[in-house]
Image (cartoon, rainbow, N blue to C red):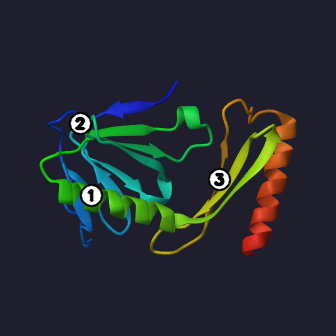
Amino acid sequence: MTAEWWVSRAPVAPAAPRGGRVLASAGGVLADRDALHLPGARATPVRVPWERVDAAEWDAEAGTLTVTEVAPDVAAAPRHVVAVDADDPRGRDRLLQVVRERVTASVVLQRHVRVAGKAGVHVVARRPPGGGALAWGFRFDVGIDPEDPGVRRVAADALARARDDVGA
């Protein structure tokens, strides 16, 4: 089961971040140097730092942006589905470009290690835009049990090799 939040077409839009410069915006979604700001269904907009964005997918037919956050279990990762105003295609295209650039820039290392067939574990190192310590994490492919001792050993070995490769 996937954790998913649907945001209505009349959500509480995020305000421009304090001290930050908006790089792109469309349909109440703002992108700044440090995070993606999504309209909230309740009174509080949702802030997702770039290093926490695992994937962002645009559905042109539905006019929605789906943002999936980083989580070890892909099936349990928080997802935010936001309706983006189609009346501003230039703003929308700029927003999608900034999202792609910022998410890609946060990834320092991403390595897939096979466990069973083609399925395995992804070791990922990400850095916040302002610098700072790397955040290390795992993402397990569908069908891979992160609680299995053999899988845990493979993941730990892969993490140790990856840390060594980047000098962390």
Where, quadrant-wise, is the C terminus in this rendering? bottom right
Q: Residue tagged by mark 1?
A: 93
Identity of the residue drawn at 27% across and 34% down? 62
Mark carried by residue 156 = none
Q: Closer to the N terminus: mark 3 or mark 1?
A: 1
Using the image, tell me which numbered label, if any, was put on residue 42.
2
Q: Are marks 3 and 1 in contact (CB under 8 Å)?
A: no
Badge 3, how many Cα within 10 Å: few under 14, some, many 20+?
some
Number of the front mark, 3 or 1: 1
Say if 52 sits above or below 78 in the image. below
User: Image quarter for residue 61?
Assistant: top left
The answer to whether 26 appears left or right of 105 in the picture is: left
Q: Is residue 3 above or below residue 161?
A: above
- Viewer-nearest residue: 59 or 138: 59
Q: Dot 2 surroundings within 10 Å: few (below 14), some, or many (20 or more)?
A: few
Above or below, 150 against 160 in this view is above
Whole-angstrom CA distance, mark 2 to mark 3, is 30 Å
User: Is 9 on the left-hand or right-hand side of 160?
Assistant: left
Residue 106 is situated, as x and y percent measured from the top left of the image, at 51, 65
Q: Nearer the viewer, mark 2 or mark 3?
A: 3
Please name the amino acid that badge 3 sits on: Gly
Residue 137: which numbered mark, if any?
Answer: 3
Please provide percent x and percent y for residue 121.
72, 45
Q: Amino acid at mark 1?
A: Asp
Q: CA distance from mark 2 to mark 1?
A: 27 Å
- Of mark 2 and mark 3, the one earlier in the sequence is 2
Q: Residue at x 35, y 69 (%)?
A: 33
**Which circle's residue, 2 or 1, is located before the other in the chain?**
2
Q: Helix or strand or loop: what does disc 3 sit on?
A: strand
Residue type of the residue flagged with mark 2 = Arg
Query: Foreground residue, 41 or 105?
Result: 105
